[in-house]
Image (cartoon, coloured by chain):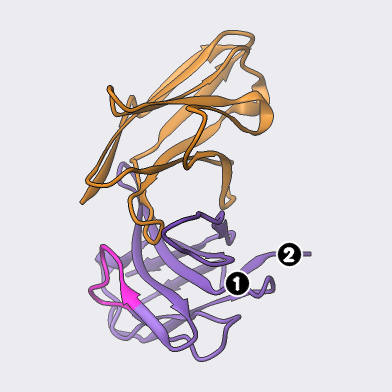
Amino acid sequence: EAQVTQNPRYLITVTGKKLTVTCSQNMNHEYMSWYRQDPGLGLRQIYYSMNVEVTDKGDVPEGYKVSRKEKRNFPLILESPSPNQTSLYFCASSKDVSLSSYNEQFFGPGTRLTVL
Amino acid sequence: AQSVTQLGSHVSVSEGALVLLRCNYSSSVPPYLFWYVQYPNQGLQLLLKYTTGATLVKGINGFEAEFKKSETSFHLTKPSAHMSDAAEYFCAVSGSARQLTFGSGTQLTVLP
């Protein structure tokens, strides 16, 4: 089954304790992205990756890191989490992205993170 | 720069009634426009998209949206609401096809 998976689905942690949220897709997609969803704010893009070893900042990158060493994986790293990073996080992927076409983004099920 | 405004964070309709969810956008280049739906405890699913061509776009589950450039709008409609339509709906714009900007979402409640 074609899908985007995220782990863990739920995470409660404390301020300053480094954590990683994994994201994996099995569709051979080139483009991957991380979003956070907060009430009343919709989804905001954190980072995105056009291909392996190519990453770029989205709208709210502060406090986050990403890496794209393999095509299928795009982990989100919080080196020193803070309470304002408590949110619902979504990973997404799409076949490719160009200026002349648009390919649908497929979203993972989400990771609910609480930072105490 | 691009942005999306969804009018009404909560909309309630009776089962069988018309659904109208409003979306206005701004974009410095010709936009790509989307509606996504999010069911409880799930990720987002694409309902429909406008890229080029016909301005009336049909999507899944009987939804459609019309791109009106002069009004910078992309409202989502469905002639007859069903209980299963209850969800949160997000309008999104992409001016470069590389970055999606989402609206704040509209929670649709369908009353029996």
Q: Which residue is mark 2?
A: A2
Shade representing chain A: purple
Q: Is residue B94 left or right of residue B45?
A: left
Foreground of the two, A90 or B69: B69
Mark 2 vs 1: CB contact within 8 A: no
Residue range corresponding to the magenta coloring: A56-64
Q: Is residue A61 left or right of residue B80?
A: left
Q: Amino acid at mark 2?
A: Ala
Confirm whether circles 2 and 1 share one chain: yes
Q: Amino acid at mark 1?
A: His
Where does the C terminus of chain B fall, quadrant-wise? top right
Q: Is there any visible trace of residue A60 in the rendered image?
A: yes
Vertical relation: A28 (above or below) A53: above
Vertical relation: A91 (above or below) B67: below
- Rendered orange, the chain in question is B
Residue B43 pos. (x, y %): 56, 53
Specify the subunit that label 2 lies on: A
Foreground of the two, B32 or B14: B32
Tell which residue pokes out farthest to the right in this image: A1
Q: Main secondary structure of the magenta part?
A: loop
Q: Which residue is mark 1?
A: A29
Q: Is residue B78 magenta?
A: no
Q: How crowded is the residue under tag 2: few (<14 C-alpha within 10 Å), some, or many (20+)? A: few
Q: Nearer the viewer, mark 2 or mark 1?
A: 1
